[in-house]
Amino acid sequence: MTRNFTWGVNRNLKVSVITPNDHVYDMVQQMAQASRRIDPSQIILINGARKGAKLQIEAAVHDEVVAFFAWEPMATKLAVAYPQVQVYVIQPSILDLLRCIYFAPKEGKLGAIIPFALRDYYDDLEEALQVMHVSFYRLAPAYDERGLRDLIRRAASQGVTDLIGTDAISAMTVARHMNWIPLRPGRGGIARAFFKALWNIHRRYQGNIRAAFPQNGMLAHYHLQDIIGSSQAITEVKELAKVYGATDSTILLTGESGTGKEMLAQAIHNLSSRRHAPFVAVNCGSITESLLESELFGYAGGTFTGANREGKTGLFEAANGGTLFLDEVGDMPYVLQNRLLRVLQEKYVRPVGSQHGVPIDVRVIAATNKDLPREVQEGHFRLDLYYRLAVLPIEVPPLRKRKSDIQEISQALLKSLDIRYHRSHTFDVEVWDFFKNQPWPGNVRQLAHVIERLVLVVKQPVIQVKDVLHVMPQADMTEGQKISGEDDGQKDLTYERIEKMSREGKSGAEIAKELGISRSTVYRIKRRHEE
């Protein structure tokens, strides 16, 4: 609650915060009073544990509050009872998790079961968890009791003595003779929910229809003009995007990691007639099979022990009328591929545990960095699903095949990052030749990471080649060390660099950061080479 609630929003608009107990009520009240940027008159604070709370909630609805902030299970009940009011769930934030780690016992072995609400931040969290000596950490949903039990068993087998997690793991942790450290929404969780609401309310009530879609939707921020470059390779991609954007057919984006496939997917969505509807994205390779199924298709009430009684809306339903972006679709478990195929063919989705289908109107854009025809040949991907997804294919070129765009991309990135960090830099002309002679296995993402490090580290106004070498020690690929244009040659080269850094004692996270790729990609390259 550090942001100004009245920022660009009509002062007559009000929200209601419904707390689960007296302690949280006092905390929220103190936060509102202490903040110089919050207008207390716009917040109706209700203690949900006291008598008369229901009448206060009804009075708030009568006063036309635009949003409720509440803790589960109250948030779900409010969403069902008052569908006309936006409901924001107060969930643990990264700050709440880091606070638990900070105050955890220093002796013993620390672990953490991270709630699925933090899935979008998981990759960034990994490095922090390693630095803070959290020896065991996994991402898990609160309602998957079997999965939680298995994770806690594995934590115990690895000698974890103190385990951070939500109330869902309390009894299971104690049963394994570990100390449970409660992870509950505190100041960080409240601030996170308010930050999300500020943006949505601002967009909705400033006449922008794009934010008026259901709360599970996401906004597609990128447009075609945000994709920088004028080379023939990227120009052809943009022209295809314009043509395909006018249709409702399924699109398959292929290309290496870091080439900007999700940015292109958002741009296509914003070119389509669905641009005022939700854009919902999910990474098919980052979560478990059972979790992915319930995320995509939802589940009926009572399907899982500890699940919401009213069930859960899946991402297909959340994206209804808009676009669902299936990232890393090549990593989707084989058993789920059949269900996805049926949804694409029949245009309805059946939640897990339900006997009834729900009709949907969703445009699917899928993306992968895998060679799907090869995956089909090896039996890892369904042929019929491949043809269903590849109706309108677009191959996004790697950076090494559009080197004429490197200067334009670098200048745009430098300008943006200088503004973000309040700096002022220019590139020495020799940097362009240096950049163009690098293989960039991590593509535009890697280039962006290098430039961000340069902006933070370089003190003088002109960035020179020696500065690039300082922040990019692996960049010893000169013009005399040409890389093969073939994919296999690129993979072998990347594997050799990964092995070299491994022998130097660098961790998977450090290697991934230097190469500008994800840690899972590092392990995947090593595994494929070994196979």
Image (cartoon, rainbow, N blue to C red):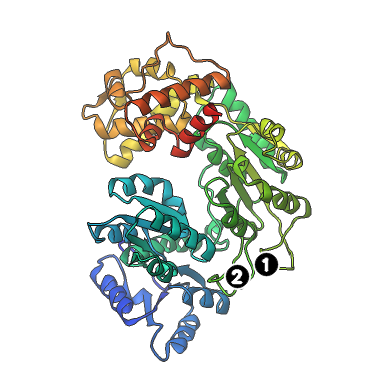
Q: Nearer the viewer, residue 9 or 515?
A: 515
Whether residues under marks 2 and 1 lie with C-beta atoms below 8 angstroms apart, the answer is yes
Q: Is the residue 269 above or below the residue 402 in the image?
A: below
Looking at the rendered image, the quarter that the C terminus falls into is top right
Residue under pointer 2: 311
Amino acid tagged 1:
Gly
Q: Position of residue 441 (x, y in %)?
A: 47, 26
Q: Nearer the viewer, residue 27 or 333?
A: 333
Residue under pointer 1: 353
Which secondary structure lies at badge 2?
A: loop
Which secondary structure lies at badge 1?
A: loop
Quadrant hosting residue 176: bottom left
Q: Position of residue 120 (x, y in %)?
A: 46, 51
Q: Is the residue 378 above or below the residue 343 in the image?
A: above
Q: Position of residue 457 (x, y in %)?
A: 25, 32
Name the residue located 55 percent from the left edge and 70 percent from the top edge: 307
Q: Position of residue 359 (x, y in %)?
A: 74, 61
Mark 2, other Cα within 10 Å: few <14 / some 14–19 / many ≥20: some
Residue 309 numbered tag: none
Q: How many labels sit on residues?
A: 2
Q: Counting residues from the N terminus, which is met first, the one under dot 2 or under dot 1?
A: 2
